[in-house]
Amino acid sequence: MYMSDKLSDNSDSDDRFSLSESLSVKLVSFMLKRIPKLKKMIENNLISDNECFTNSRMFYNLIKFNDCLVRDVMIPRTEIYAIDITDVPDSKNLIDKVVKGQYTRIPAYENNLDNIIGFIHIKDIISNFYNEFNARNIIREVMYIPPSMKAVNLFIKMQSSHIHVAIVIDEYGGTEGLVTMADLIEEVVGDIGDEHDVPTVPSIVNISDDKVEVNARVLVKDLEETFNIDLRDCKEDDYVTIGGLILSMIGRVPVVNEVFEHKSGAIFSIKEVDDRCIYKIIIDLSNVKKIDLKVDH
């Protein structure tokens, strides 16, 4: 006998952040009020950019953040892991998809990604884990914003509305990207973690000297820096992860055991994938030319 489909009230929205997130919100809010004074000190050479960076990394990041647009910090469309709410016939199916994605907040859409109707929080699933429930009853509200919005204004809006997930909409009403409050905070204070994060296996696993297995969510820049290689045509490419690179390269979701050769010489073999998302890839780097990665000063 199933329990009632009616779940606990979810009207609080997403305002019950982890302790680290809550403290970070207060810290960023405090620092935002001091941006004009700090900028004036730098302009008057009372403190150098280098000194500001060395002695106060967060203030340096905050000044950059104050000038950022949403498009500069968003997760691009090709990187979004989302769930089609019409394709989850029961709670078990939904739980399987959430666990597979390994995210704490997952957008939910109807039929296609341009019709995102909200998001699902993993703790709502955990609290109803032993009950049969309707997935639509735990969908939380998102806000819809343009890519030209200032990131700092989005932070303020999220803080006041207690809606901590925003969908970036292009001029035609399509989904262009995704931003969470945690993404904005991490632009300033670095990785804050999440008490609800799902533990994961290592993102890069060495198989041999020139062959690795990677999680599709590994950042391209991290793989480049780890192995001193270059996988991007330019730094403005519309992807940030290895999975996004593959989607950009072939223009579709691949199938298991499909193999692709990148112009750098890297060979990608798809190890784990479903009809919407890549999960694991084996990369052969034996034919990739090593480079010296310079750090700009």
Image: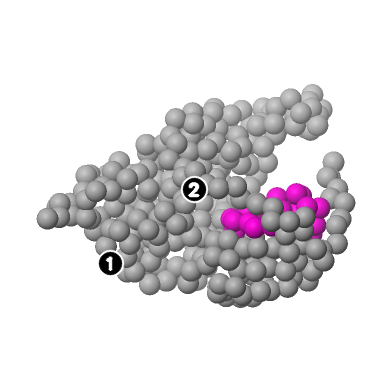
Q: Mark 2 and mark 1 in contact (Cβ < 8 Å)?
A: no
From the viewer's perspective, tell me whether residue 93 is left or right of residue 259.
left
Q: Residue at x 49, y 43 (%)?
A: 199
Q: Residue at x 58, y 61 (%)?
A: 280
Q: Which residues are the magenta region?
A: 212-231
The amino acid type found where label 1 is placed reads: Pro
Residue toward you, 159 or 215: 215
Task: Give the image quarter of residue 33.
Answer: top right
N-terminal label among 1 and 2: 1
Find disc 1 in the rendering and name its residue: 89
From the viewer's perspective, tell me whether residue 284 is left or right of residue 28.
right
For mark 1, give the secondary structure: loop
Establish if 248 lies above or below 45: below
Find disc 2 in the rendering and name its residue: 180
- Check if residue 224 falls in the magenta segment: yes
Q: Is residue 151 visible?
A: yes
